[in-house]
Amino acid sequence: MMQLILTVLAIALAALLAVGGINYFSTDIGVRVEVAQGLRAQHDIMTAALTNYRLANNGYIPTSVDSLTGFFPDGKVPTFPKTPDAFTWSISKDSAGSRYWLCLRAGSVIPSRVAREGVASFVRDRAAKSLGPIYYGENKSGFGVHGCGLDATAVAADAAGTTFDADDISANTMISIEGI
């Protein structure tokens, strides 16, 4: 009887080690989801604050995010708990001065690959919802054709055949979202 119990325990232990050592889920998914959902929430709050600002100011669009402090919850844009300065938002207009853009820029430190994947997920999500053109590229000085300092070399994230992913993001990458 003792040998039978030891045999069953040995088989159970071997099965546990064989199955328990295999990890089918990426442990980075939590960071990726946190970044993507955080950016979605920030974008939604920015859009709501801009709408309320325009209603309160006869349709005028603010020139900076600082003008919106009275329209945000707690008077500021919600930040990421672990890295509050990971991404910054700004408002820009194109070189013709006819369209305004909401700009997202990575902080001074290049985000990790997982964080960049979260940003890419956010951009693909917003592009799929057709909220207006979304461009990305290297930040140039000045207004730029597509706002946010992006010139004509900027790529439309929602263009056919374009796959925006983590490799498209660096420390100098700017993402511009039209529609404010």
Image: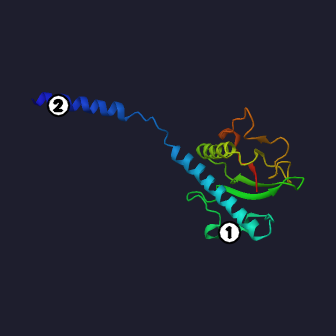
The x and y percentages for residue 101 are 78, 54
The mark nearer the N terminus, 1 or 2, is 2
Q: Quadrant of residue 18?
A: top left
Of residues 14 and 46, the one drawn nearer to the viewer in this rendering? 46
Of residues 110 and 57, the one drawn nearer to the viewer in this rendering? 57
The answer to whether residue 4 of the structure is visible from this angle is yes
The x and y percentages for residue 176 are 75, 50
Is 113 situated left or right of 142 in this image? left
Question: Residue 6 — which label?
Answer: 2
Q: Quadrant of residue 164?
A: top right
The answer to whether residue 173 of the structure is visible from this angle is no
Residue occupying image coordinates x 73% and y 64%: 65
Residue occupying image coordinates x 69% and y 58%: 47
Where does the C terminus fall, quadrant-wise? bottom right
Where does the N terminus fall, quadrant-wise? top left
Residue occupying image coordinates x 17% and y 31%: 6
107 vs 157: above or below: below
Of residues 12 and 151, the one drawn nearer to the viewer in this rendering? 151
What secondary structure is found at the residue carrying circle 2? helix
